[in-house]
Amino acid sequence: MNASNFPAFSRRGFLFGSGALVVSFSIVPHVLAQEGEVQGATPAPAEPDLPGSLGDTPSLDAWIRIEADGGITVFTGKAELGQGTKTSLRQIAAEELEVEPAAINLITADTALTPNEGYTAGSQTIQNSGTAIRYAAAQVRQILLGQASERLGVPAEQLRAEGGRVLGPGGASLGYGELVAENLLHVNADPATVLKAPDTYRVIGKPFARVDIPAKVTGGEAYVQDMRLPDMVHARVVRPPSYTASLAELDEQSIEAMPGVLAVVRDGDFLAVVAEQEFQAVQAMRALAAAARWEERAALPDQQQLASFYESSATEVGSVSSVGGEAISGAKTIEAQFMRPYQMHGSIGPSAAVAMLEDDRMTIWTHTQGVYPDRGAIAQMLAMPAENVRCIHVEGSGCYGHNGADDAAADAALIARALPGRPVRVQWMREQEHLWEPYGPGMMMRTRATLDAGGKIVDWHYDLWSNTHSTRPGSAGSLIAGRLMGRHFPQDSATLRISPLGNGDRNAIPLYEIPNQRINWHFIPDMPVRVSALRGLGAYANVYSIESFMDELALEAGADPVEFRLRHMTDPRARKVMEVTADEFGWSSDPMPERRGRGFAFAKYKNHAAYLAIAIEMEVDADTGLLRVSHVVSAVDCGEAVAPDSIINQTEGGILQSLSWTLYEAVHFNDTRVTSSDWSAYPILRFSAVPDSIDVHVVDNPGTPYLGVAEAAQGPTAGALANAFRNATGKRIYDLPYTRERVRATLGV
Amino acid sequence: MMKLDINGAIHEVEADPSTPLLYVLRNDLEMNGAKFGCGLGQCGACTVMVDGKAVFSCLVPIMLVEGRKVKTVEGLGTIDDPAPMQIAFIEEQAAQCGYCIPGMMMRAQALLESRPDASDAEIRTALEPNLCRCGTHMRILRAVQRARELMKTAAAPAANGGKA
Ligand code: FES
Ligand code: FES
C-alpha cells in the first residue's frame, strides 16, 4: 500500500475525466453547513433517516467501487489532516467488507471524484464520513452475498464474506470482482442496513499502524509542498504590510529583469512574482517588497483596551440558554471576568498550493479543509464556472482549523491564470503565514454564580463577547486574494447564529446540573483582526472560563474540586471519565509541597461529542515566573474507539497544543499592523516545557456511536492548568496566556 | 557548478552559491525530507546533518557545504530498508501531520551518532531547537529513546556497512 495521495502525475494523467477509476456520480449534494461554522441557514438533509453523510450522498457507488479484478476503492469527502483519517476510514470499510485494510484504495477529498462532505472540521470525520462508509460497506457486503446466493443457488445465510471473496458450502467461492456487474452498486443506501456486531470485530478497535508514516519518515512525497509537476514554476506573493494598506507606487521593471523571473503579477493590491527556480522567486519577492510603497491606515483596536473594544462593538445579544428563574438568591454569589487573546494556528509548514490553468480549466492542489467550498469561492474570484475548477486535497502541514490553506490555493489560482499551461507552486514565507492566517478570535467571558447553603450552584450567569469563529469560504471575499485583487470582493458579513453545536458559544453551556441559567453571546460583527475557525472554536475559552470558575465555586463551598463537579453531574459517562482520571492521577485534596499544585477540569466537547477529563500537576517558579507541568492524566470517552492509538495520539497532541496556547500565545498588534511575525515574536511550546508524562486513558464503548475527539482536550487542558496554578499559589490568573511576566505580576515579584 | 556530497553521493549542482542548501536539496535534487518551515533558523523543520552536526539547511548557503558531508533523512534508510531511527519512529507511531518529523530525526541522529548513550534529558535538550505544532512531543521522545537502543544493537555486530 502506498501512502502517497497524489493521483497520477503524468502530464495528462491528472486532467479531467481521464483514468478508468471512477464513474460519475448521480448526486449533486448541497454544500454541508457543519459545525455551526458556516454562515446562513442549515440545509435540511435530503434523507434524514440515513446515517452520517449518507443523508447528503445516498448512492453507494459514490462511496465504494469494486472493479472487475476485485480492487476496492473507497471515497471520502474528508481529508487527512494528520489525524490518521486515511487509516481509520480504511479500518471501518475493511471491517464491514471483510477484507484487510491494506486491500482498500482510499481516495480523499477531490471535487472531481469524491462526495461533497463540506469541511473536514469539528472532529466529525469519523462521525460523518466514517458512519457513511460503515453503512455503505455493510450494505455492499450484503448485496454481494445476495448476488452470490443467486449465482450459487444457495441461501445467503449459508454464505460468508472473507478476504474479498464470498465462500459457500462445498468449497464454493466467488471473488467480489466476479460478483459486481455494471451499476450493481448504483443504488441508494438503505437506512435499515445491519452492521456487524462489536463482538465480531476483526479490525475496528485493533491497533493498526498509520499508513502514511513510513513515507513521511523516509523522504517520500507526502505533502502538497513536495509536489513537483513537469514544467512547474515557483511563485511567491508580496503582501501589504497591514490588512487595509493599498498599493501607492510600484516599479516592477527592475524585478522583471532579475534572473529567472518569468512574471510579476499585479492585480489591484495583489502582488506576486513567478520564477523558474524557487530561490529566484524568493529573491525577486524581496526585491518586489522593497520596491512597493503602500499607504496604510490605523484600523486596529488598542490591544491594551480590548475589553472596552469588545463591549462597544457588540451589536447584538443572542440567548444561548435561558433556564429557570431570573435573580435567584442564595448563600453566596461570586463573579469573574476572563480574557482570551487572538491566537494562531501556527502550522509548521507555511501554506502552499499548486495550480494550473489548461484549456479553460483550473486544477488546484490544496491542503484546504473543504475542496468544494474552496472551489466555489475560487471559481467566483476567477469568474469561471465551478465545473471548470477542480480542487484536489493533498496533505499539508497540520492545520488545526482554517489556516492559510484556502488563501494559498486562491493565490496559486490567480497567479496560474497569468501563465496558462504551467503548473505554479506557491508557498508562503513564515511571516506571511504568521501575519495573514485568520486567527482564533479574541474573547471576553463574564461569569456570576450563586451557591446555596448546601454548596450547590443554584444560579449561573455567563456572558461572552466574540466575533464569529468561522469566515471560511464563503464567497471570493473570504479569500485574501479576492479581497486584494482589483475587483476587491467584499468580506462576507458575519451574523449571529445560535446553533446546537455552537460557534463562539460552543460549550458556553456548562454540562453541570444548574437549575437557573442565563447564557448570552454578545456578538461582534466587525473583524478588524482577521479571524476564523481555530481548533475547538469558542470551546477553548468557554471551557477554560467555566472550569476555572467551577474551582472558585468549589473553594467557596469548601469542597474538593472533583467532588464538587461530581455533585453537579448526573451523566454517567461524564462521571466515568472524571472518576477514571481522578483514580489514575491519584487525586487528593492533601496539601502539596510549596509552589506545587494540582488542577482538574472536564468537558463534553460541544456538549455532543467526546467526554474528556484531565488532571495536571505543576510547579511554579515564582522568581522567574516559569511554570512547569510535570504530570498529566486524562480519560476520554468518544464512543466506540475505532483506532485507540490514534485517539491517544490526537488527545496528547490536543493537550500539548492547549498547554502552548495557554502558557505562551497571544497575537500582538499596534494600531496599524500585526507584529507577531515569526516564532520569536510568537513563541510556542518547546521540548523543555513538555511534561514528564502524559497518560491518556481511552474509555471504550463498543457499539455506541462515534463521537469526535480531535478537539476535546483544548478547553479542559486550559482549565486544569489554571486550576493547578491557583492550587499552587493561592492566586488566580484570569487573562490568557500565563506568560512569565503575568505570573510574576500576579505573584507580586 | 558546485559539487556537493549528499548522503555519500557527489552531485553537481548549478545554482547560485548563495542559495540555501534547503532549496537545492528540495528542488535541484528533488528530495522531500528536509522541509521549509521558517527560513529563519527558528523551527528546525529543515534540519540536516553536515559533517555529523545538525544544522538548519534553510540558513546554510551551498558554498559553505562544498567538501563536507551532508546527510538527510533519505540517507538513513529507505521505506523498504529503514534505518533504526526510522524504524523507531514507525514503531512508536511518532507523527501526527509528520511535517516536523524528518527534522527531529536528523537532530536526534546527530546526537546519537556522537553520543550513543545520551540520556533522556540530553535527548530533550538536544531537540529544543525543533518545533512541533501537532503536539507529538511525547512520542518523538519515546521514538528517539527507542532509536538509541536500536542503534546500539545495530552497531554491536561491528561490520554494519556504516548504516545509520
Ligand atoms: S526552516 Fe530552517 S529552521 Fe525553520
Ligand atoms: S507532527 Fe505535525 S508538526 Fe510535528
Image (cartoon, coloured by chain):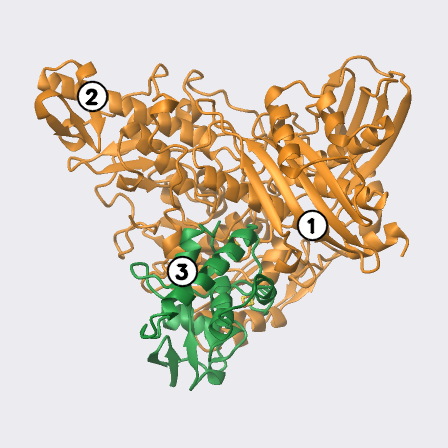
Quickly name the residue at label 1.
A629
Q: CA distance from mark 1 to mark 2?
A: 55 Å
Q: Chain of mark 2?
A: A
**Same chain for the residues under marks 2 and 3 in the image:** no
Q: Residue at x 34, y 52 (%)?
A: A4
Q: From the top left corner, tell me how far across and down residue B39 is, in percent.
A: 55, 68
| Of callouts 1 and 2, the N-terminal one | 2
Q: Are marks 3 and 1 in contact (CB under 8 Å)?
A: no
Name which quarter of the figure residue B2 lies in: bottom left
Q: Quadrant of the C terminus of chain A?
A: bottom right
Quickly name the residue at label 2.
A145
Quickly name the residue at label 3.
B86
The residue mark sitting in front, 1 or 2, is 1
Residue in front for this viewpoint, A581 or A643: A581
Q: Amino acid at mark 2?
A: Leu
Above or below, A537 relative to A15? above
Helix, strand or loop under label 3: helix
Residue A261 seen in the current view: no
Name which quarter of the figure residue A556 lies in: top right
The colour with which the image depicts chain B is green
Name which quarter of the figure residue A96 lies in: top left
Helix, strand or loop under label 2: helix
Q: Is residue A25 left or right of residue A382?
A: left
Q: CA distance from mark 2 to mark 3?
A: 42 Å
Q: Residue at x 76, y 50 (%)?
A: A738
Q: Is residue A272 left or right of residue A184?
A: right
Q: CA distance from mark 3 to mark 1?
A: 29 Å
Residue A650 seen in the current view: yes
**Tally of numbered tags:** 3
Q: From the top left corner, tell me how far across and down residue A739 is, in percent.
A: 77, 54
Residue in front for this viewpoint, A48 or A127: A127
Image-quarter location of ligand 1? bottom right
